[in-house]
Image (cartoon, rainbow, N blue to C red):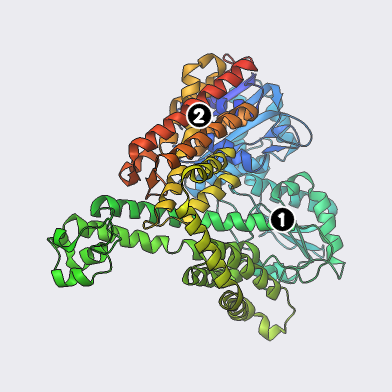
Amino acid sequence: MALITEQLVALDVDLGATKADVIASLAGLVERAGRAEASGLTADALEREGKAATGLPGGFAIPHCRSAAVSEASLAFARLSNPVDFGAKDGPADLVFLIAAAADGDADHLKLLTKLARALVKKDFLVALREAKTPAEIVALVDGVVEPKPDAAAPGAAVAAGAAPASESAPAGDRPVIVAVTACPTGIAHTYMAADSLVAAGEEAGVDVRVETQGSGGVTPLPAAVIAGAKAAIFATDVGVKDMARFAGLPVIESGVKRAINEPAVMITEALAAADNPSARKVAAGGGGGEESAGEGSQLSVGKRAMQALMTGVSYMLPFVAAGGLLIALGFLFGGFDISLAPGATAARQCADLSWADPAACAEASSIGELAIATGWGAGLNYLGGVLFAIGAAAFGFLVPALSGYIAYGIAGRPGIAPGFVGGAISVTLGAGFLGGLLTGLLAGVVAAWLASRKVPRWLAGLMPVVVIPLVTSLIVGGLMYFFLGNPLAALTQAMQTGLGGMSGGSKVALGVVLGLMMCFDLGGPVNKAAYLFATAGLDPANPASLQIMAAVMAAGMVPPIAMSVASFVRKGLFNKAERENGQSSWLLGLAFISEGAIPFAAADPLRVIPSMMAGGAVTGALTMALGVGSYAPHGGVFVFFAILNFLGFLIAIAAGVAISAALVIALKQFTHKKADAAAV
């Protein structure tokens, strides 16, 4: 199926005043073509937009995402009569491509999408798009780029039909060589546009720029000989560089991926200057983010690097939370909530109640789950519950080590993983919990990166990333934990748990308010993730306070998408067509605890939507605490009802928050009425 058809093109139209309006309208085109579900595609595209704006110099924008809501990879195009600000430095965009890739799309489609992205840096292609008279001409232009015929002469076709990528092209004589890596979070568009911008700028400057694009279409590593002959490296990435150790010793210029699109010539100049500067920053020997010197050159700030590392750790940890937590919840469903408790313990079944168990074995069993596993199918559903619980507990056990290991990876690269995992495991052993995991991850990353930056003899260099750095860093981090940090952190963690367990009345409600505010502040952003991490990292089936915290976080996170659905249904006139369409499905996202379902509303009107959602979330958080609601599951919303303690109270708390948020957002929109753009799309 073609990526773009005339049905997916809108020429000289006004799709609204904000980029959220435009994205929603383009998503609507894709839906009407039967290729996607509009609200899900809009939410995913806006979530990607929230990470970095997609407006680029030249008056065009390329909102894009990989989304489960997309059934067929598609391009939707709009030429706007009313240009909209997409965050480009040189002004609003009149040309907008919505690149919609299926979450499980094949590599061929991704390659086609990247060809379009690369063509958009060609001025003649943009001119042709602006001069096209009909949708058919737009389709022909795009087809000429993404699927050129052998003799195609369409503008930009050379990009698609061009020779091999810069990394594979023939040597360029005695011109200086600069190697570069480009990578953006989605790996569809900016990665390749940055690469082509650097190559083009290098051509104008007489520099041979070889780029390794680390995007969704796979990675073709730069040849070792090319790297060895390079004078400097450019890392234009929004995510970590894979196998950075290959570039060890090269002077390096670092930035986000968009700078390579906006200022490629400046970065080439900086790289050439770094190559001639003995004190310039160099890529560390172990491939980490460390430096061989505190030299000159563009680099990420310490704060941004630390934040990237923390978010890397959280993002790698979440799959363990989801898989482990939901399996544990299923274990409770089939085996009962006392599956993790010893027979006869408080709130657990007695041996006399477990008719399927051998009395002698029951008396010595450490938990009903283990007893059921030892008994086998003779324990009936208890056996299945015990197995599910054991699998989930095993996955959940990696939570802190994975957090620590991937924080270290975010700082130091591959050499940081092993000492980070070791530090996290030690933190668990000493009872230092996720606080210890955060600290060991940062320590391991910093130490590994520092070691990687040391100058060592050539014979030792090969051993540094695989033996020396993991060994020494693990020893340092482990020693610090056992001799100095472990006990204080364990005491602090225990104090927190004791304090949370002892909370009652107003203090517990206040905690619920804070958690509710955090969950609704940025709808899946760092603040939201911090609250979620606090709840999931401390989730312990034997600790009622941790169950209540988990319930408060989950219930509050469900409020925004449901509230916006209710508000857009009750007062349709206050919302434009795209928002009303989003509202028809966002309630379902809310019920599943997907806070991001409210992002399209918040992106379009943050000053009225976000405060309203925070107010409702705070009420929901407070009520869950006051009503004693608990959750054994870390995710799933109402669909894990079986893992919710006081499910009625859970629903009451959510309903109250939804009512308040919906009423507030309606009142704010009514009070400071912005004319609904109901006819805009």
Between the residue at mark 1 and the residue at mark 2, the CA separation in whole angstroms equals 39 Å
Asked if one can make out residue 124 in the rendered structure from this viewpoint, the answer is yes
Kindly identify which residue carries mark 2. Answer: 30
Local secondary structure at mark 2: helix
Q: Nearer the viewer, residue 478 or 342?
A: 342
Q: How many numbered discs?
A: 2
Left or right? Give the position of 569 relative to 297. Answer: left
**Rendered location of residue 187, percent (x, y):** 59, 49
- Type of amino acid at the residue the image marks with label 1: Gly
Residue, x 56% and y 62% (percent of image)? 435
- Res. 188 mark: none
Spot the residue most to the front. 505
Mark closest to the chain's N terminus, 1 or 2? 2
Give the crowd class for mark 1: few <14, some 14-19, many >=20 residues within 10 Å.
few
Give the crowd class for mark 2: few <14, some 14-19, many >=20 residues within 10 Å.
many
Residue 306, above or below 446: above
**Rendered location of residue 255, percent (x, y):** 74, 53
Residue 334, above or below 475: above
Kindly identify which residue carries mark 1. Answer: 303
- Where does the C terminus fall, quadrant-wise? top right
Local secondary structure at mark 1: helix
Residue, x 49% and y 32% (percent of image)? 561
**Rendered location of residue 101, percent (x, y):** 51, 40
**Rendered location of residue 127, percent (x, y):** 73, 30
Where is residue 680, by image quadrant? top right
- Type of amino acid at the residue the image marks with label 2: Val
Asked if one can make out residue 223 in the rendered structure from this viewpoint, the answer is no
Residue, x 84% and y 53% (percent of image)? 205
Residue 608, above or below 555: above
